[in-house]
Amino acid sequence: METRILLEIIGYIGSALVVISMMMTSVLRLRVVNILGSAIALCYAIAVKAYPVAALNAFLIAVNVVKTVQLFRVEKSYHLIQSKGTAGLPQYLVQKYNKDILNFFPDFKKIDDDDDVFILMNGDAATGITAGKIDKNKIFNVKIDYTTPAYRDNSAGLYLYKEIGKRGCKRVVFETSARNHEAYMYKIGFVKISRGKYVKELIENL
């Protein structure tokens, strides 16, 4: 393969990664993929002596590295608010993030008035909403477990279920047809027991 064609392929790969990163909902993943794409594009620009393009990509790398470091340095001070139904803050969050919620939970319809709702807060900022029904056996049947894009580093989910366990729940059961939520669930300790059904034991947190 000619060197020119190979360089063009490398350039297209870098550009494609940058574009793909902009469509990601996870801020951390966006930054990492953008850094990788910009680094490849930087190498291509230097190779073809397109120095203005090289400078732009070097700048993008620097910005994304700084922003990524800041993500890990942000001090998180989580606390949990428990309520019933959609009145007030739960309704606001569902309406505000409705499009993104449906992207991860296409089966989600609404939060019912008798649903158990948990709002995860970081300081004064609402970072997520989890809702469903806690039955008489202390099993939490979840219909939605949504985290806002800025807090999708698993720390929110780990804190959430630890606190729910402390409040008496023994197990969490979640059924969904969406596959793009699966990786997150595995990371915070869910086990897949059948097609579309996941379980997390909480008794150890009591």
Image (cartoon, grey):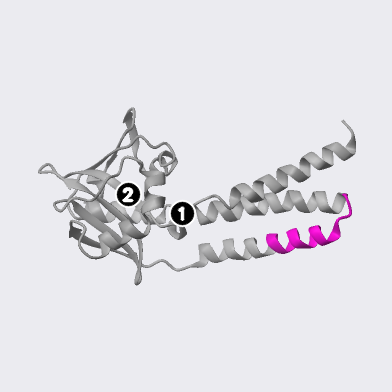
In the rendered image, which residue does mark 1 sit on?
A: 153
Near-viewer residue (105 or 121):
105
Residue drawn 72% across the image and 64% down it: 59
Write down the region rendered in magenta.
Answer: 48-61
Q: Residues within 10 Å of mark 1 (few under 14, many from 20)?
A: some
In the rendered image, which residue does mark 2 sit on?
A: 145
Q: Give the vertical position of 125 relative to 204 (above or below).
A: below
Where on the picture, by quarter, is residue 63?
A: bottom right
* Residue, far top: 194
Give the label on residue 55, or none.
none
Residue drawn 29% across the image and 51% down it: 161
Question: Disc 1 on helix, strand or loop?
Answer: loop
Judge from the rendering whether residue 115 lies leftward or rightward of residue 108; answer left or right: left
In reply to whether residue 52 is colored magenta, the answer given is yes
Question: Disc 2 on helix, strand or loop?
Answer: strand
Q: Give the vertical position of 57 relative to 201 (above or below).
A: below
For the residues carrying marks 2 and 1, which lies nearer the camera in this image? 2
Where on the picture, by quarter, is residue 149?
A: bottom left
Q: Give the vertical position of 151 relative to 138 (above or below).
A: below
Q: In which quarter of the image is the N terminus?
A: top right
Measure how far apart labels 2 and 1 are at the Cα level: 14 Å
Image spot of residue 151 (x, y percent): 43, 58
Main SS type for the magenta part? Answer: helix
The amino acid type found where label 2 is placed reads Asp
The amino acid type found where label 1 is placed reads Asp
Near-viewer residue (6 or 134):
6
